[in-house]
Image (spheres, rainbow, N blue to C red):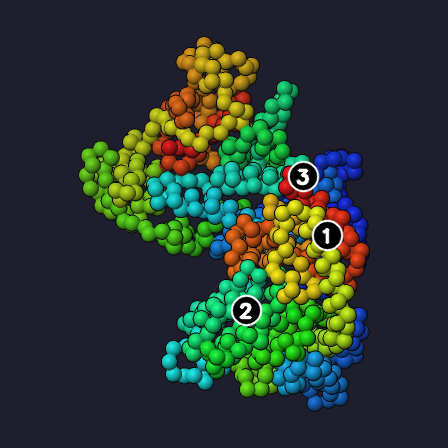
Amino acid sequence: MRWHGFPGSSSACETDPVRVLVAMSGGVDSSVAAALLVGAHGPRRVVGATLKLWGGDSDSGCCSVADVDDARRVADQLGIVHHVFNFSAEFEAHVVDPYVTGHVEGRTPNPCIEYNRHLKFDRLLDRAADLGFDAVATGHHARVERDPDGTWRLLRGADPAKDQSYVLAMLGQDELARTVFPVGAMTKPAVRSLAADLGLRTAAKPDSQDVCFIRSDAGRAGFLGDRVPLHPGRLVDHDSGADLGQVAAVELVTVGQRRGMGHGTDGRRRFVTAVDVPARRVTIGPPEASYATGVALHTVAWIDGVPAALTDGRSGTRSSARPGERSGGWPASSFDALAQCSAHGAPVPCTVRADADELLVTFARPQRRIAPGQTVALYDTDRPDSVVGSGVVR
Amino acid sequence: MSAPAEGTGAVDAYRAYLDHAATTPLRPEALEAMLPLLTDGFANPSGAHTESRRARVALDDARDLLAELLGAAPGEVVLTSGGTEADDLAVHGGWEALAAARPEGPPPAVVCSAMEHHAVLRACRSLAARTGAELREVPSGPDGRIDLAALAEACRPDVGLVSVMAVNNEVGTVQPLDEVARIVAAGAPGAVLHTDAVQAVPWLDVARTTAPAALVSVSAHKFGGPKGSGALVVRSGARVRPRLDGGGQERGRRSGTPNVAGAVGAAAALAVTVAERDEAVARVGALRDRLADGLLARLPGAVETGDRDHRVAGILHLRIPGVESEAAVVLLDEAGVAASAGAACSSGAVEPSHVLEAMGLDRRQASSGLRFSLGVTTTGQDVDHALAWVPGVVERLRN
């Protein structure tokens, strides 16, 4: 089948100067993203690209040969050119190696975010510019909009259950100006339904799960165990410091983890409150000890530059629609926001202030501890679907 | 040559196909010879009836012709599904046969050049992993030819199999097989010498060039024959243990119903290739040199890989600093130039070149390699087209 039009949208316009490179993972979202672009711009203005990221074993997500085949066959069906770009060296350097190193050092990095930061919205944007494309499109469930003053905004996807703005919260104006998320305004069922209507072979393909470069049978333990030595560690009580037993591999334990930590003498569940890999020590405590009132962030990124409230303190000069301005202008160099601490976590009100290169986020109510290496995304209090920025937990 | 550009996003309808080292268009002579075997002559040559005998005659005639043109006896030609299977049979099967003859001591060691095609390199590595045999990979000099001193170092009496290609597929350098054979005979007497001659056939007197090797791999689609057809020459005195169990075709060396049309197409293509080789080498070599000189003059900083005096007529490999070859091939395609980044995996992604690394180039240098490979259908207009479009692509990627 060759498909040259999208029901309900204007058809290809040959004078349209836009050329879009659509990143096709072989999944249903990016397949439909490509189809929508073909409907809007025509097949000659859209080129598909699949990134070869991983030379090792993998059985899911972004990395397998079967996914490349699916992406190429969908591109064939849509009548667009398809390329495979080998970014495996960069993937290893920016995603896999830091993932391994993070665990060795007691952090739990989010590889999807590092992938987006270093590959999809850096390396691929550069490659697209080299090849004369105006924009890169992906199948992410998020939206990009432009304010009347020209500022680009990153907004949550229309489907709350599938919103992926959290993993894109490191993007800035330069990236957003050249990025398109064609399925961001659709719900996932609508995406699947359109894929089925178009006869795309990926219509019923399951969503990718977990970390794409880790085989499900080996798991994180097998993956890390093949690359670095794993060490047993002591389990220590958060309050008393008492020795509570042993864990098989301290590198595999994450702050906030509940699974495998058992119950205390009070009969309540125990949570990991701290991991000290060099000391081979995991600290656990009751639920109340597993909460924190705030968190410090590094590797801070802003959608539209540093908020005025953090740079000129007491009185922001930008419009009140901006994050960072409080009606009283107090306290200096801080602003209110909504913090989202995991891919699908509930946003919580917080206050954000700058401290040297770090951001200090104070939650309105204590939150379950967030593992170092994880990302916190900040959203606009006045416009809760709009991302303000993000940072990585110290 | 020109072909429709539909679906390519090409900005210009003219297409210059400069990827003959990847595969060549089928020679009309091969197509003509094959058609009867794909229609009336369909029978299995192993049968006892008239239809089979017709197919058998075609197969035997093809084998005789291939043998003559490859400088071998008909019984020495083992038909395979292509170059990769021929290499696999040579490395695994050749080693197994030799190891069976040397039951005492450690498993015989294997030597190969580090710039072998993956069909040889990975076969050697899997053989070593499977059997415990030691594998010695011999590097190349910056000229793209095997380091003979390192080869001599590697060729010791414990060696059972040596594999050195006749012509490198990425940079086109001709390897000194006569000297290789002398070194092997001196340092590792009794070792079997295999050569992957897949890229040599269109350009060299392959019968003479490969004469020092006991095992010789060729692939039909690299010289105007069909894909899925190749051969391993197993000279008398050398032996290979079969890799496939089955009906015992090819004198027990390669089971499976013979690809009669493939063999006939290979023989027809080889016949015309050999007959026209001198003329093709002169004509295509001149086109290649014009392309090389023109691009070097137009691309500041570009470097020709390997020694031009020891390179086959069809291959030009350039390194263009500041240009990622993976991006360049995409833009060249849009400009109507079909070129290659050197090594591509099955998905089409560009792999870092182990050949350039074997020559001592670092990863950054290796990622700027572009291969233009010409063939007998290449025209002056193809070269003009490349000369007109490549500089603009390079300039764009450098800005």
Q: Is residue B208 left or right of residue A340?
A: right
Instruction: Give coordinates of residue B132: x percent, y percent.
Output: 41, 72
Nearer to us in this view, A163 or B396: B396
- Which residue is rendered at x = 54% and y = 83% of the image? B239
Identity of the amino acid at label 2?
Answer: Val
Which mark is first along the chain, 2 or 1?
2
Q: Is residue B242 visible?
A: yes
Residue wearing tag 2: B120
- Which residue is rendered at x = 46% and y = 74% of the image? B155
The disc at residue A133 is: 3
Q: Kindly state the secondary structure of the residue where label 2 is placed.
A: helix
Identity of the amino acid at label 3?
Answer: Phe
Q: Are marks 1 and 3 in contact (CB under 8 Å)?
A: no
Q: Quadrant of residue B32?
A: bottom right
- Which residue is rendered at x = 44% and y = 71% of the image? B153
Q: Quadrant of residue B270?
A: bottom right
- Which residue is rendered at x = 58% and y = 86% of the image? B236
For the residues marked 1 and 3, what is the alpha-carbon distance in whole angstroms?
29 Å
| Chain to which mark 3 belongs | A
Identify whether A33 is placed above or below B258: above
The residue carrying pointer 2 sits among few (fewer than 14), some (14 to 19) or many (20 or more) residues within 10 Å by Cα, namely many
Residue wearing tag 1: B294
Instruction: Give coordinates of residue B116: x percent, y percent.
Output: 55, 66
Q: Nearer the viewer, mark 1 or mark 3?
A: 1
Q: Quadrant of residue A121?
A: top right
Identify whether A163 is placed above or below B367: above
Badge 2 and badge 3 both on one subunit: no
Q: Is residue A329 left or right of residue B175?
A: left
Nearer to us in this view, B23 or B308: B308
